[in-house]
């Protein structure tokens, strides 16, 4: 019943921008953490940015100053604004949430299907 629905992604030139959105749909009880990960071919999945309940955010060093993560509590969504993109940012970006469904007593991990971001030089 619970899904993370992603939008955005695409092909951009170096220096360009993209905005990734992810909304939790279904019978949602409570959301603890929402985050964006990325995974490039041959590389391990990497945490890009995370926002917690209190609004605190963390970023991987390589995107600091270029990416901004924000959370809309009313929409149950998280947005990753990516500016000044570099070819090294090319990867599949995946939305993540630690949430409790309304019918569930436990918090569980949920993942989006992933959206491709390709940055050309």
Image (cartoon, helix red, strand yellow):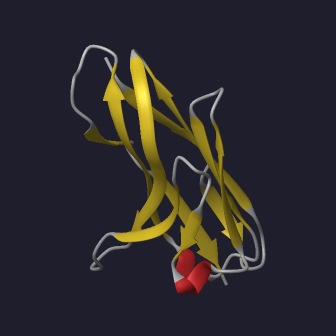
The C terminus lies in quadrant: bottom right
Percent x, y of residue 82: 69, 65
The N terminus lies in quadrant: top left
Percent x, y of residue 53: 53, 46
Asked if 110 appears above or below 55 in the picture, the reply is: above
Seen as rendered, the residue at the extreme front is 54
In the image, 53 versus 93, the foreground residue is 53
Which quadrant of the structure image shows residue 41? bottom left
Percent x, y of residue 69: 64, 58
Asked if 73 appears above or below 34 in the picture, the reply is: above
Which quadrant of the structure image shows residue 101? top left
Residue at image point 32% right, 29% down: 100
In the image, 49 versus 33, the foreground residue is 33
User: Is residue 44 shown left or right of residue 57?
Assistant: left
Percent x, y of residue 16: 78, 70
In the image, 105 versus 111, the foreground residue is 105
Asked if 26 appears above or below 109 in the picture, the reply is: above
Residue at image point 65% right, 81% down: 86
Residue at image point 70% right, 66% down: 12
């Amino acid at each position: 019943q619970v899904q993370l629905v992603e939008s955005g992604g695409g092909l951009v030139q170096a220096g360009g921008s993209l905005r990734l959105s992810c909304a939790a749909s279904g019978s949602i009880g409570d959301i603890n953490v929402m985050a964006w990960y990325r995974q490039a071919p041959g590389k391990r999945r990497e945490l890009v940015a995370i926002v917690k309940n209190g609004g605190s955010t963390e970023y991987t060093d390589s995107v600091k100053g270029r990416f901004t993560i924000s959370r809309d509590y009313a929409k149950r969504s998280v947005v990753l604004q990516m500016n000044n993109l570099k070819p090294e940012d090319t990867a599949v970006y995946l939305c993540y949430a630690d949430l409790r469904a309304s019918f569930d007593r436990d918090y569980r991990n949920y993942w989006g299907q992933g959206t491709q971001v390709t940055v050309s030089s």
